[in-house]
Amino acid sequence: MKLLDGNAEEYKKRHNPIWLELKEVLLNHGVIRYSIFLDKDTNDLFGYAEIEDQKKWEEIANTDVCRKWWDYMAPLMEVNADKSPVSIDLMEVFHIEKNN
Protein backbone atom coordinates (compact mmCIF):
# COMPACT_ATOMS: atom_id res chain seq x y z
CA MET A 1 0.00 0.00 0.00
CA LYS A 2 1.13 3.59 -0.34
CA LEU A 3 0.56 6.76 1.68
CA LEU A 4 0.15 10.10 0.01
CA ASP A 5 2.93 12.57 0.88
CA GLY A 6 2.67 14.21 4.29
CA ASN A 7 0.25 11.73 5.85
CA ALA A 8 2.51 9.46 7.90
CA GLU A 9 1.72 11.00 11.29
CA GLU A 10 -2.03 11.11 10.65
CA TYR A 11 -2.00 7.51 9.42
CA LYS A 12 -0.24 6.42 12.60
CA LYS A 13 -2.59 8.51 14.74
CA ARG A 14 -5.70 6.94 13.16
CA HIS A 15 -4.41 3.47 13.98
CA ASN A 16 -3.57 4.21 17.63
CA PRO A 17 -5.89 3.15 18.97
CA ILE A 18 -7.66 1.29 16.20
CA TRP A 19 -11.46 1.42 16.34
CA LEU A 20 -12.66 -1.21 18.83
CA GLU A 21 -15.34 -2.45 16.41
CA LEU A 22 -12.71 -2.94 13.68
CA LYS A 23 -10.39 -4.77 16.06
CA GLU A 24 -13.25 -7.10 16.99
CA VAL A 25 -14.03 -7.80 13.32
CA LEU A 26 -10.38 -8.58 12.62
CA LEU A 27 -10.08 -10.93 15.58
CA ASN A 28 -13.46 -12.56 14.90
CA HIS A 29 -12.35 -13.23 11.33
CA GLY A 30 -9.30 -15.18 12.44
CA VAL A 31 -6.54 -12.59 12.62
CA ILE A 32 -3.86 -13.81 15.01
CA ARG A 33 -1.32 -11.03 14.48
CA TYR A 34 -1.43 -7.98 12.22
CA SER A 35 1.24 -5.32 11.79
CA ILE A 36 1.71 -2.49 9.30
CA PHE A 37 5.15 -1.05 8.65
CA LEU A 38 6.01 2.24 6.94
CA ASP A 39 9.05 3.01 4.79
CA LYS A 40 9.37 6.76 5.47
CA ASP A 41 11.54 7.31 2.38
CA THR A 42 9.02 5.90 -0.10
CA ASN A 43 5.70 6.12 1.80
CA ASP A 44 5.24 2.41 1.11
CA LEU A 45 3.24 0.46 3.68
CA PHE A 46 3.83 -3.24 4.28
CA GLY A 47 1.09 -5.18 6.01
CA TYR A 48 1.90 -8.49 7.70
CA ALA A 49 -0.94 -10.65 8.98
CA GLU A 50 -1.01 -14.10 10.50
CA ILE A 51 -4.47 -15.54 9.95
CA GLU A 52 -6.39 -18.70 10.73
CA ASP A 53 -8.18 -18.99 7.39
CA GLN A 54 -7.82 -17.22 4.03
CA LYS A 55 -11.59 -17.21 3.33
CA LYS A 56 -12.41 -15.60 6.69
CA TRP A 57 -9.66 -13.00 6.07
CA GLU A 58 -11.13 -12.10 2.68
CA GLU A 59 -14.63 -11.73 4.20
CA ILE A 60 -13.42 -8.79 6.31
CA ALA A 61 -13.68 -6.58 3.21
CA ASN A 62 -17.43 -7.19 3.12
CA THR A 63 -18.13 -5.91 6.62
CA ASP A 64 -19.70 -2.51 7.25
CA VAL A 65 -16.93 -1.47 9.64
CA CYS A 66 -14.23 -2.27 7.09
CA ARG A 67 -16.02 -0.16 4.46
CA LYS A 68 -16.30 2.71 6.95
CA TRP A 69 -12.60 2.34 7.75
CA TRP A 70 -11.68 2.50 4.07
CA ASP A 71 -13.73 5.70 3.68
CA TYR A 72 -12.00 7.17 6.73
CA MET A 73 -8.51 6.29 5.51
CA ALA A 74 -9.00 7.10 1.80
CA PRO A 75 -7.81 10.73 2.01
CA LEU A 76 -4.43 9.54 3.31
CA MET A 77 -3.47 6.90 0.76
CA GLU A 78 -3.76 5.57 -2.74
CA VAL A 79 -7.13 3.82 -3.07
CA ASN A 80 -9.22 1.93 -5.61
CA ALA A 81 -12.65 3.07 -6.81
CA ASP A 82 -14.32 1.27 -3.84
CA LYS A 83 -11.92 3.10 -1.45
CA SER A 84 -9.99 -0.08 -0.65
CA PRO A 85 -6.25 0.52 -0.43
CA VAL A 86 -4.30 -0.03 -3.62
CA SER A 87 -2.07 -2.96 -2.81
CA ILE A 88 0.12 -5.49 -4.52
CA ASP A 89 0.90 -9.02 -3.43
CA LEU A 90 4.55 -9.69 -2.72
CA MET A 91 6.27 -12.96 -3.53
CA GLU A 92 7.81 -14.69 -0.55
CA VAL A 93 11.44 -15.47 -1.30
CA PHE A 94 12.52 -16.80 2.09
CA HIS A 95 10.86 -18.19 5.20
CA ILE A 96 12.08 -20.02 8.28
CA GLU A 97 10.38 -21.01 11.49
CA LYS A 98 11.10 -23.23 14.43
CA ASN A 99 8.98 -26.36 14.71
CA ASN A 100 7.76 -27.14 18.21
Image (cartoon, rainbow, N blue to C red):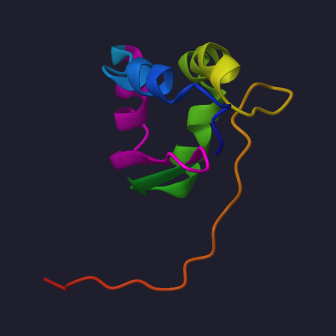
How many labels were placed on the picture?
0
Q: In which quarter of the image is the C terminus?
A: bottom left
Residue 70: x, y in percent?
A: 64, 22
Residue drawn at point x = 53 percent, y = 46 percent: 57
In the rendered image, the vertical position of residue 44 relative to residue 13, given as above or below: below
Q: Vertical placement of 21 versus 48: above or below?
A: above
Residue in the picture at 36% in, 21% down: 18
Give the camera-side residue of 55 and 96. 96
**Which sits in the foreground, 1 or 4?**
4
Left or right of 81, for residue 60: left
- What is the x, y in percent for residue 86? 74, 42
Magenta span has 32?
A: yes
Q: Nearer the viewer, residue 56 or 31?
A: 31
The quarter holding residue 52 reads: bottom left
Q: On the image, which quarter does residue 72 sit in?
A: top right
Residue pictured at 59% horizontal, 26% vertical:
6
Name above or below for residue 57 compared with residue 76: below
Residue 94: x %, y % from top left: 46, 86
Residue at position x 57%, y 25% in the image: 7
Magenta includes 11? no
* Residue 11 place in picture, x, y as percent: 49, 25
Extreme-right residue of the structure = 81
**Residue 51, picture quadrant:** bottom left
Q: Give the range drawn in magenta.
A: 21-44
Q: Quadrant of the N terminus?
A: top right
